[in-house]
């Protein structure tokens, strides 16, 4: 059975041929396919090839094949390995998943960063995300007092 | 074909527009440290998945984050993703994340010691309606350390009263409290009238006011049922006074009326454990354990919505020799449970230890083919388990305790 292929074009000019069934996990692409404007390929002006490769890898894995179902446990393990990336790459994946409207990838990437943030102190967060501390010492003390449970 | 080309152009222009918006952020990534490249709205998506305790700590990151964590829209978005915990208030506050096995303890708010022990609590959106031994009433958010004392209309016979907390409408800006006297204590079940007209009191937090009306109630809430607040309404297991049927009674805070919802999927027996809880945020769940066989059944409903019939389906049944007996004796605390995201039940119950003199409070995670016991929460002497319930399900949330519009001091 021949599957319909479509071409995705990254912002840096690379082309990727993908099965339509795999690609339409992206709601954005799915709408374009519905509106039948994919003949010349789909330009993805804000997704770099480096990121598009990862997105396609994800969509291929999550394209459910009834004949070879994957257990949830195995998928979770795969997710963990898949998300073993540099922070900046993860952020770009969040942007791409958001733009391409792939809910499960968006959830996974956001949750990964949320898990990273979970154990950090405000100082560590500020340093990671380049945020300035605009509290005075008095203001800081007031917030700390109000939320005793969190600081124990 | 002209319309089709318009659509193609429109999509292309949307993409271009998006690129124009994205470019400044992408270029920022080149200059500054790796991670400032997300627009704040996407940062919000990440932050709403961070557990409450961490978010509280991160209030100190910067003023913009502090403002976000105080923003109503974000608060409820975050609430929708919070996992269930269990809370106990036996001398200290213990908030337990059963799935992970983490437990934090801290002291009760100062005034609580003066008001006596907490007799019962009803959780709603991370707010806890607390009723004290002395009859005092407060709404409390332990995460934010906020307490609001509710002035009482008249002395309450707290032992005979049922309490509820919910909200009017979907915008959740009008939380209300319900109190009514539960018939079974004031009227002999077998008396010939079969109905009574107690006062039903409703308190609105926003306007800091009570209103009372008398309603004819020909039913009563069954013993040991503390009520469940779900999507703004209250639910109890109730029995008609004049017939043996058991059903789910509800109180709608928008219409301020009692509405019988549906019957139970199991035959009710006062010796069996029958407990109500939420399921997936919109549905009811029922935990049932037979005293005779120790078999545990978990039933769930479809979405609870106005005008839609409620149907029960069995989530699973489990019989195995190592199943805990959730209520071995009447003088132990009633178990409390919730269903986790993997459809396993997480149940907190009291079990008598081998020495037959002490009781341990344990948490079990039970699935169709698995059972796991978490570390013991605490131990105490057998004889008197106060307040007769093992704990309450609790969503640690950022929802502030509503203040009254007239800013009446406590």
Image (cartoon, coloured by chain):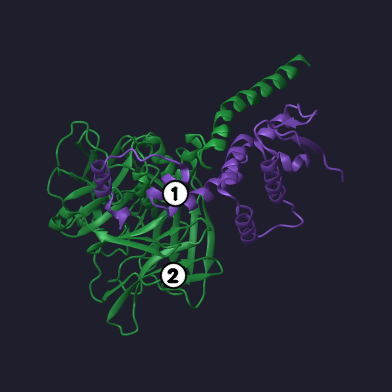
Chain colours: A purple, B green
Give how far across and how far down residue B270 sits, in percent: 35, 65
Please indicate, yes or no, whether residue B288 appears anywhere in the rendered image.
yes
- A21 or B270, which lies in front? A21
SS at mark 2 in the image? loop
Please indicate, yes or no, whether residue B195 appears anywhere in the rendered image.
no
The residue tagged 1 is B50
* Label 2 with label 1: CB-CB less than 8 Å: no
- B143 or B275, which lies in front? B143
Q: Residues within 10 Å of mark 2 (few under 14, many from 20)?
A: some
* B388 lies left or right of B288: left
Q: Which quarter shows the C terminus of chain B?
A: top left
> What chain is tagged by disc 2?
B
Inter-mark Cα distance, 2 to 1: 39 Å
Q: Residues within 10 Å of mark 1 (few under 14, many from 20)?
A: many
Question: Which image quarter: residue B118?
Answer: bottom left
Residue lying furthest bottom in this view?
B355
Residue lying furthest right in this view?
A1
| Disc number for residue B290 | 2
| Disc number for residue B283 | none
Question: Which image quarter: residue B165?
Answer: top left
Mark nearer the N terminus (2 vs 1) = 1
- A103 or B310, which lies in front? A103
Question: Which image quarter: residue B285?
Answer: bottom left
Q: Residue at x 34, y 69 (%)?
A: B377
Give how far across and how far down residue B290 sits, in percent: 44, 70
The vertical placement of B292 against B226, above or below, is below
Q: Which quarter shows the N terminus of chain B?
A: top right
Closest to the camera, between mark 2 and mark 1, is: 1
Give how far across and how far down residue A100 sits, in percent: 64, 36
Q: Residue at x 54, y 32 (%)?
A: B25
């Amino acid at each position: 059975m021949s599957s319909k292929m479509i071409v995705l074009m990254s912002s840096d000019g690379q082309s990727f041929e993908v099965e339509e069934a795999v690609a339409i996990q992206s709601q954005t692409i799915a709408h374009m396919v519905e509106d039948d404007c994919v003949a010349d390929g789909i330009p993805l002006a804000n997704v770099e090839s480096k990121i598009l490769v990862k997105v396609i890898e994800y969509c291929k894995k999550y394209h459910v094949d009834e004949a070879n179902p994957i257990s949830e446990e195995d998928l979770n393990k795969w997710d963990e390995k898949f998300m073993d990336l540099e922070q900046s790459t993860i952020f770009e994946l969040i942007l791409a998943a958001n733009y391409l409207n792939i809910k499960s990838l968006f959830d996974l990437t956001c949750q990964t960063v949320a898990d990273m943030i979970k154990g950090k102190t405000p100082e560590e967060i500020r340093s990671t995300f380049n945020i300035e501390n605009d509290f005075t010492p008095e203001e800081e003390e007031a917030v700390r007092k109000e939320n005793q449970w969190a600081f124990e | 074909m002209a319309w089709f080309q318009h659509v193609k152009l429109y999509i292309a222009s949307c993409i271009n527009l998006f690129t124009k918006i994205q470019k400044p952020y992408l270029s920022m990534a080149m200059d500054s440290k790796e991670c400032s490249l997300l627009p704040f709205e996407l940062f919000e998506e990440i932050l709403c998945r961070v557990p409450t305790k961490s978010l509280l700590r991160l209030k100190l990151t910067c003023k913009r984050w502090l403002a976000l964590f105080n923003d109503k829209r974000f608060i409820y978005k975050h609430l929708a993703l919070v996992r269930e915990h269990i809370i106990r208030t036996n001398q200290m506050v213990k908030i337990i994340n059963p799935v992970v096995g983490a437990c934090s303890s801290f002291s009760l708010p100062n005034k609580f010691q003066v008001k006596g022990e907490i007799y019962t609590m009803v959780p709603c959106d991370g707010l806890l309606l607390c009723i004290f031994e002395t009859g005092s009433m407060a709404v409390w958010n332990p995460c934010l350390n906020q307490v609001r004392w509710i002035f009482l209309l008249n002395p309450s016979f707290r032992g005979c009263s049922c309490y509820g907390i919910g909200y009017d409408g979907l915008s959740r800006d009008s939380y209300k409290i319900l109190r009514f006297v539960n018939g079974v204590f004031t009227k002999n079940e077998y008396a010939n009238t079969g109905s009574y007209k107690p006062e039903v009191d409703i308190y609105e937090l926003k306007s800091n006011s009570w209103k009372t009306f008398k309603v004819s109630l020909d039913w009563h809430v069954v013993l040991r049922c503390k009520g469940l607040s779900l999507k703004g309404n209250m639910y109890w297991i109730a029995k008609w006074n004049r017939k043996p049927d058991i059903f789910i009674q509800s109180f709608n805070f928008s219409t301020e009326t009692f509405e019988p919802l549906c019957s139970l999927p199991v035959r009710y027996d006062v010796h069996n454990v029958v407990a109500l809880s939420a399921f997936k945020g919109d549905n009811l769940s029922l935990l049932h354990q037979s005293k005779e066989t120790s078999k545990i059944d978990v039933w769930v409903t479809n979405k609870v919505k106005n005008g839609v019939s409620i149907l029960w389906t069995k989530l699973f049944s489990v019989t195995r020799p190592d199943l805990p007996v959730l209520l071995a004796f009447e003088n132990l605390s009633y178990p409390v449970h919730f269903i986790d995201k993997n459809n396993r039940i997480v149940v907190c119950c009291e079990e008598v230890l081998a020495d037959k003199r002490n009781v341990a409070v344990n948490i079990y995670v039970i699935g169709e083919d698995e059972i796991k016991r978490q570390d013991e929460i605490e131990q105490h002497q057998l004889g008197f388990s106060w307040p007769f319930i093992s704990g309450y399900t609790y969503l640690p949330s950022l929802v502030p305790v509503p203040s009254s519009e007239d800013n009446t001091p406590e």
